[in-house]
Image (cartoon, rainbow, N blue to C red):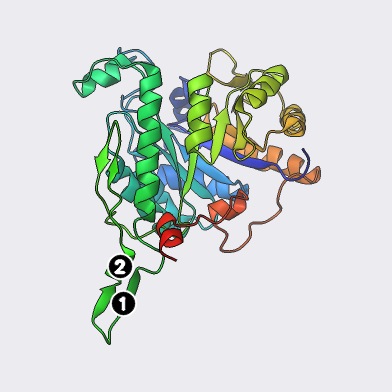
Amino acid sequence: MTGQLHLAVALDGYGWHPQAWRATLASNPDTPSVLSGRYWADLAATAERGLLDFLTIDDTLMPQIGRGERIHPERLAGRGDAALVAARIAPVTRHIGLIPVATVTHTEPFHVSKSVATLDYVSHGRAGWQPRVSVTAHEAALFGRGSVNPDELFSEAADYVEVVRTLWDSWEDDAVIRDVATGRYIDREKLHYIDFKGKHFSVKGPSITPRPPQGQPVVAALAHAGPAYEFAAASADLVFITPSDTASVRGILDELADGQLKVFADVVVSFQGQSDYRSDALVWAGTPTELVDLLLEWQRLGVDGARLRPAVNAADLAVIVEEVVPLLQGAGHFRTRYREDETLRERLGLPVAANRYTAVTQ
């Protein structure tokens, strides 16, 4: 595969390294809190300056990321709601896509549906959503729920995404007419009960939010192995994979075997050379030039793009924007400007999302 590479960034707290907060505050004690709008707006402005396709904002149900219940005092604890952070970023950006993480386990699809639809409105068609499946016993305990088999959790997640997608379609695109002469604000024939009845959810609908500008905001999934790959293929528009090397890229692409999915490889980038920790994704401590060579090699194998996770946002995001992007542009593999009024679906080359109810009624 050749041509343009998609490039995104994953943001989590002060960065993906467990000690990112210390490195950040040691370098600049006046760095805003991760709970401030200014902090996230500054990161988004930097990412947009680099012409990146989109950014994701991580989220969990626990104060700290991890599978253990214990709170580590030496690590960042506490976070804002990713969807609300994305809504804060939307008005101060113009082009970059915004994909918050929202956990589907232990939560309700109706609320996520309207939250992401609202984000699509305030961002003028730049929204997405990354469903997160929670498999840990301590997160289940927060809701008084026992441990559940992971396969069952991914089955629940598939139903969840289907409910969200159907709610997005429950208003046809032209349901809001605002006809002053007749006194009709909506055409009620173009609002639909979804009447979803499944193993995990029963939802009548319709949504309280009209159909989003994109019709269907982009759905992304992080996948490490079999059940997650199956979930991504059935429910998502794009998938984040976590190869450890070039050989594993080949194996993952063979296992996915779905030509419709956009495939992004996740890489933790530490241009300061900090590789002293483990991650679910490859930890890259090399140079920007070496990273670009690796990404283009993976692109030739069939990967559509990369999602880079800065080890320390304050240091590594700037290197992505100021060094990695120009190298890709110089090789002819990355845009030199954004297209005006482009939705996230359009940027990723996804088809126009037809409304399932409009197709039935026409």
233 lies left or right of 196: right
Question: Residue at point 77% right, 44% down?
Answer: 3
Residue 186: percent from left, percent from top: 29, 71
Out of 68 and 218, give the one closest to the viewer: 218
Q: Position of residue 171 (x, y in %)?
A: 35, 60
Rendering coords of residue 185 (x, y %): 27, 74
Amino acid type, residue under disc 1 in the picture? Arg
Give the label, 2 or 1, closer to the camera.
Answer: 2
Residue located beneath label 2 in the image: 189
- What label does residue 178 carry, if any? 1
Q: State the image coordinates of residue 118 (x, y, percent, origin top left).
A: 35, 54
**Residue 156 in which image quadrant:** top left
Badge 1 marks a residue whose secondary structure is strand
When asked about the image quadrant of residue 202, the answer is top left
Query: Residue at the spot x=45%, y=31% of the render?
Result: 14
Q: Are marks 2 and 1 in contact (CB under 8 Å)?
A: no
Q: How many numbered dots are placed on residues in this image?
A: 2
- The image quadrant that residue 339 belongs to is bottom right
| The C terminus lies in quadrant | bottom left
Which residue is at a point 45% across and 23% down the rendered structure image?
22
* Looking at the image, residue 163 lies above or below residue 137: below
Looking at this view, is 304 or 256 the one in front?
Answer: 256
Residue 202, relative to residue 312: is it above or below? below
